Amino acid sequence: MSSVDDAPFAAEPRDDRAAGHVPPPPPGYEEAMRLALAEAERAAARGEVPVGAVVLDEEGGTLAAAGNDREASGDPTGHAEVLALRAAAAARGTWRLDGCTLVVTLEPCTMCAGAAVQSRVSRVVYGAVDERGGAAGSLWDVLRDRRLNHRPEVIMGVLAEECAALLTAFFAARR
Ligand SMILES: [Zn+2]
């Protein structure tokens, strides 16, 4: 990274950061985000972009956890969120994940935001903002698009500094 301002992964959206009106995330998702961060760290150790995701059931129990595996699998859809949603659906025996919460270290891309909508999760919680590709408020807001009839609740900024730091360090090391 040539400067901090060039980093695409941030703890808060750039516009709102200046204005200072991003509310702090509600408590209760740090523990799940720690699990997602552990998945992201394992992904980094495998040479994958460090993004991790978990799916929680209605009671907050962990249904599934996954990290990116696109390099190992050669699968363009091998993002942490898709893998975690797939595993959660397999665990439940249905594609419908009503009442569940997807927790992910980085703002979902269009594919993963679409997968979250399709899975009918009730909530999406993410850490770092992806200013170059985020589809949950940065470039697009697929999750809260009023034209879609399923719109999960969105909570951002949980352990955002740690989530962003992991990504920034990974890409810095690859230069
Ligand atoms: Zn994605």
Image (cartoon, rainbow, N blue to C red):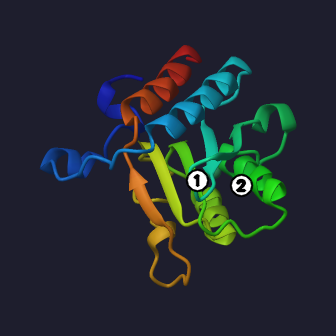
Q: Amino acid at mark 1?
A: Leu
- Quarter residue 154 falls in: bottom left
Q: Quadrant of the C terminus?
A: top right
- Quarter residue 35 falls in: top right
User: Residue tagged by mark 1?
Assistant: 102
* Secondary structure beneath label 2: helix
The crowding category of the residue bearing disc 2, from other C-alpha atoms within 10 Å (few below 14, some 14 to 19, many at least 20), is many
Q: Residue at x 69, y 40 (%)?
A: 65
In the foreground, 159 or 130: 159
Can see residue 157? yes
Q: Residue at x 61, y 51 (%)?
A: 56
Q: Quadrant of the N terminus?
A: top left
Q: Amino acid at mark 2?
A: Leu
For marks 1 and 2, the one nearer the N-term is 2
Q: Residue at x 55, y 84 (%)?
A: 149
Q: In the image, residue 5 lies at what x, y percent?
A: 30, 32
Can see residue 140? no
Mark 1 and mark 2: span between their CA atoms?
Answer: 8 Å
The reply to whether the C-beta atoms of the residues labelled 1 and 2 are less than 8 Å apart is yes
In the foreground, 123 or 161: 123
Q: Is residue 173 above or below residue 146?
A: above
Residue 33 placement, left or right of 86: left
* Secondary structure beneath label 1: strand
Residue 121 placement, left or right of 31: right
Q: Residue at x 51, y 28 (%)?
A: 167
Q: Is residue 12 above or below residue 45?
A: below
User: Residue tagged by mark 2?
Assistant: 85
Kindly give the residue lying farthest to the front in the view shown.
Answer: 59
In the foreground, 47 or 40: 40
Q: In the image, residue 59 lies at what x, y percent?
A: 57, 54
